[in-house]
Image (tube, grey):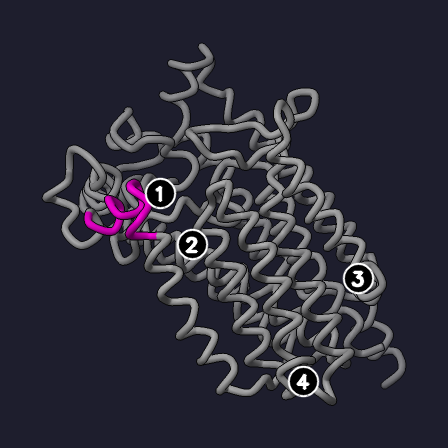
């Protein structure tokens, strides 16, 4: 009986991760259609333009999730450096004339045959895999500065610099926070971690204050109503959306703020439309689903059988949780605007696929825990 139980556990998967992700994907498809219909009709003559693409992205994400669920996570240990090298190459290629595709002044996309790909999303996954491999290999000397700390920070700095140049400050922040979290869990000396934190704060301050639009975002965060016609426009209308949603919301499709008040309501601020249309009840359901994913990710990490799996799970679920927290913080006026999407709910292909891959890997780790 014990062997049968072990076999069943090793061949199964974490159903909380699976159904939580599928639920968010379904909510995302509905909300993308609702939030984007007016914008799509004006730009492309069809209210279902973004909806159709999001359905394709969601189906592709499910395929990626299932594939990663059945690929042994141990294979990423061997692929850590090749994945990292490809990521660096793609980030560099972005800056070649005629290759990188710029939108709104940001050069973040590679576009081939009408299909866009965002290398910075791959950078997050590549960094996590590299750190998990490197830290597990160097565990005995993890507290040595030149072995457990410095090489990892050099890789982070190199990736972060290429991402900031796009510019994509929000993703760079995610990369730094995930690295800090993984090094902390791995046992790197606190002196090294907090010294690095103290050293990076002035750099972050400079990147914010000495770049015009970031400084305006910071000022609008401190007093959005003072800048409601300029830098605080998005935050003000986001808060108005939540305020008018009440307990049960105005109903799917009945958002007022999506009617050209919230710029790109189906991407960064899709949660604002959700709050207006589904109210506090809808907000609590979505937040509860994210909390469930984070909880199960932590459980997977705690039950993992080897260091590589532990660090990999910690990195993947930390990245997901941090992105959710930052996006929710921005749309609710608790953080300055960062330009990060809401995992599984916002419109977009690359982010959806990379997050689906992360959940699939977590499910594989969970399924192999009893092997």
| In the depicted structure, whether residue 81 falls above or below residue 346 | below
Magenta residues (range): 208-219
Which quadrant is home to the C terminus? Answer: bottom right
Residue 10 position by quadrant: bottom right
Mark number, residue 274: 1
Q: Which of marks 4 and 1 is nearer the N terminus?
A: 4
Q: Does the magenta stretch include residue 213?
A: yes
Residue denoted by label 3: 76
Residue denoted by label 2: 286
**CB under 8 Å between callouts 3 and 4?**
no
The number of numbered discs placed on residues in the rendered structure image is: 4
Q: Is mark 3 on a helix, strand or loop?
A: helix
**CB under 8 Å between callouts 1 and 2?**
yes
Cα distance between the residues tagged 3 and 4:
21 Å
> Nearest the camera: 141 or 340?
141
| In the depicted structure, whether residue 152 falls above or below residue 361 | below
For marks 3 and 1, give the one nearer the viewer: 3
Question: Label 2: how many residues lie within 10 Å, few (<14), some (14-19) or many (20+)?
Answer: some
Q: Earlier in the sequence, mark 3 or mark 4?
A: 3
| In the depicted structure, whether residue 283 falls above or below residue 149 | above
Q: Position of residue 12 (x, y in %)?
A: 77, 66
| In the depicted structure, whether residue 271 falls above or below residue 6 | above
Q: Residue at x 56, y 68 (%)?
A: 179
**CB under 8 Å between callouts 4 and 1?**
no
Q: Where is residue 143 in the image (x, y as percent from the top left)?
A: 63, 88
């Amino acid at each position: 009986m014990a062997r049968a139980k072990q076999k069943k556990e090793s061949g199964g998967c974490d159903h909380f991760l699976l159904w939580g992700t599928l639920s968010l994907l379904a909510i995302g498809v509905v909300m993308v259609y609702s939030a984007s219909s007016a914008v799509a009709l004006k730009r492309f003559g069809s209210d279902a333009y973004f909806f159709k693409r999001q359905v394709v992205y969601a189906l592709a994400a499910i395929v990626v999730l299932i594939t990663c669920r059945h690929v042994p996570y141990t294979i990423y240990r061997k692929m850590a450096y090749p994945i990292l090298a490809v990521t660096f190459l793609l980030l560099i290629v972005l800056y070649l004339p005629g290759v990188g595709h710029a939108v709104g002044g940001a050069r973040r996309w590679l576009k081939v045959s009408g299909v866009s790909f965002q290398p910075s999303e791959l950078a997050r996954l590549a960094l996590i895999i590299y750190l998990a491999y490197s830290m597990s290999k160097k565990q005995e000397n993890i507290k040595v500065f030149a072995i457990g700390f410095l090489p990892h920070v050099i890789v982070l700095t190199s990736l972060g610099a290429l991402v900031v140049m796009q510019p994509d400050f929000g993703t760079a922040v995610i990369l730094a926070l995930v690295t800090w979290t993984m090094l902390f869990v791995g046992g790197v000396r606190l002196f090294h971690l907090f010294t690095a934190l103290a050293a990076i704060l002035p750099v972050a301050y400079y990147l914010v204050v000495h770049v015009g639009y970031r400084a305006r975002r910071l000022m609008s965060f401190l007093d959005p109503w003072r800048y409601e016609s300029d830098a605080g426009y998005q935050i003000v209308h986001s808060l108005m959306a939540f305020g008018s949603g009440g307990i049960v919301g105005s109903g799917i499709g009945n958002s007022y703020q999506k009617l050209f008040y919230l710029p790109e309501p189906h991407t960064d601020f899709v949660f604002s439309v959700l709050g207006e249309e589904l109210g506090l009840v809808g907000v609590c359901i979505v937040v509860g689903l994210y909390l469930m994913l984070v909880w199960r990710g932590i459980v997977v990490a705690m039950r993992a059988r080897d260091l590589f799996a532990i660090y990999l799970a910690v990195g993947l679920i930390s990245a997901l949780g941090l992105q959710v927290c930052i996006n929710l913080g921005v749309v609710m006026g608790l953080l300055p605007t960062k330009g990060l999407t809401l995992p599984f709910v916002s419109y977009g292909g690359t982010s959806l696929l990379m997050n689906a891959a992360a959940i699939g890997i977590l499910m594989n780790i969970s399924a192999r825990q009893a092997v």
